[in-house]
Amino acid sequence: ISVRSEFIAAGEPCAFNVSVSWRNDGSSTYDGGLWVGFHDAMPELESRFNLVRRPWASAAESVESLDDVDGYEGPVPLEGTPEWFGFADNYFALVFAPQEPVDGHVVFNSTGSLEAPLFGGQYIVDRALPPGSTYTATFRGYAGTKDSEAMSAIDPRLATVVQLGWFSFFAEILLSGLRFFYGALGNWGLAII
C-alpha cells in the first residue's frame, strides 16, 4: 500500500483541505483498513483547568475525548460514523471533517514506546482495496481558536468542537449577548462591561 497526502490552503482563515489517497500496488486485495492517524505526546492532566491538548472526535452526534491517558488500557473505539476528529485543548483545535460519508470509525489509541507513548487515534475507512486500485478520502481541516462561528463557516459539523460544559444553555445566551454588543460597539472590553 502506498499513501499520498496533500494539504491545500482554503480561502477562509485557519481552513485547509486535505486529500489522502491509498493505492494498492500489490497483487492481492488489501483489507486491513485504510486509516489516517493523529498522535502526539500527552502530558499528565493535573486538573481540568490545565491547558492540555487531547484527542477529540465526534461520531453519531456524540463528542468524545481521551482524557485519562494515565489509566489508558487499550484502544477505545467510538461508535457511529465519524463527523470530525483531531486534537483540542481549552482554547485551540486542529480538527478534520470527512467530506463524503464513508463506512468508517475512529479509534483512540496509543503508539510509540512505553517510556514515551504517543496518544491519539485513527480515522479508519472500512474498505477493501483490490490490486491496482486507488481510494481517495478528502477532509476539510481547521487549525485555530475554538470559535464556533468560524468553525461553522468551514463545516457546520465543527461547531460541536466547542464544548461549554454543564452550563452550555446559559453560556450560549451569554455568548450571543457578547457577540451582539461587540457587533454594536466594535470592542470586546466594552461588550463585556
Image (cartoon, helix red, strand yellow):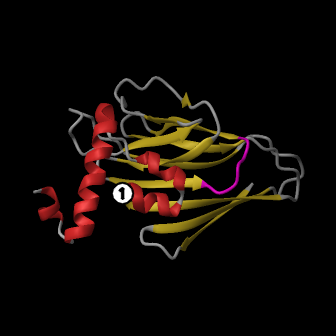
SS of the residue at dot 1? Answer: loop
* In the foreground, 85 or 11: 11
Which residue type carries mark 1?
Asp
* In the foreground, 144 or 152: 152
* In the foreground, 67 or 62: 62
The residue drawn where x is 32% and y is 45% is: 172
Q: Residues within 10 Å of mark 1 (few under 14, many from 20)?
A: some
The mark tally for this picture is: 1
The residue drawn where x is 47% and y is 73% is: 12
Position of residue 123 in the picture relative to residue 164 (left or right): right
Q: Which residues are magenta?
A: 98-103
User: Does residue 120 appear in the picture of this structure?
Assistant: no
In which quadrant of the rendered image does the N terminus lie? bottom right
* In the foreground, 169 or 39: 169
Position of residue 1 in the picture relative to residue 26 (left or right): left
| Vertical side of 172 occupied by 47: above or below | above
In which quadrant of the rendered image does the C terminus lie? bottom left
Quadrant of the rendered image containing residue 65: top left
| Vertical side of 187 occupied by 76: above or below | above
- For label 1, the residue is 147
- Dominant secondary structure, magenta: loop
User: Does residue 157 appear in the picture of this structure?
Assistant: yes
Residue 43 picture location, percent across and down? 29, 40
The residue drawn where x is 24% and y is 45% is: 51
Residue 10 picture location, percent across and down? 53, 73
Q: Is residue 100 magenta?
A: yes
Position of residue 5 in the picture relative to residue 182 (left or right): right
Residue 183 picture location, percent across and down? 27, 67
Q: Is residue 151 magenta?
A: no
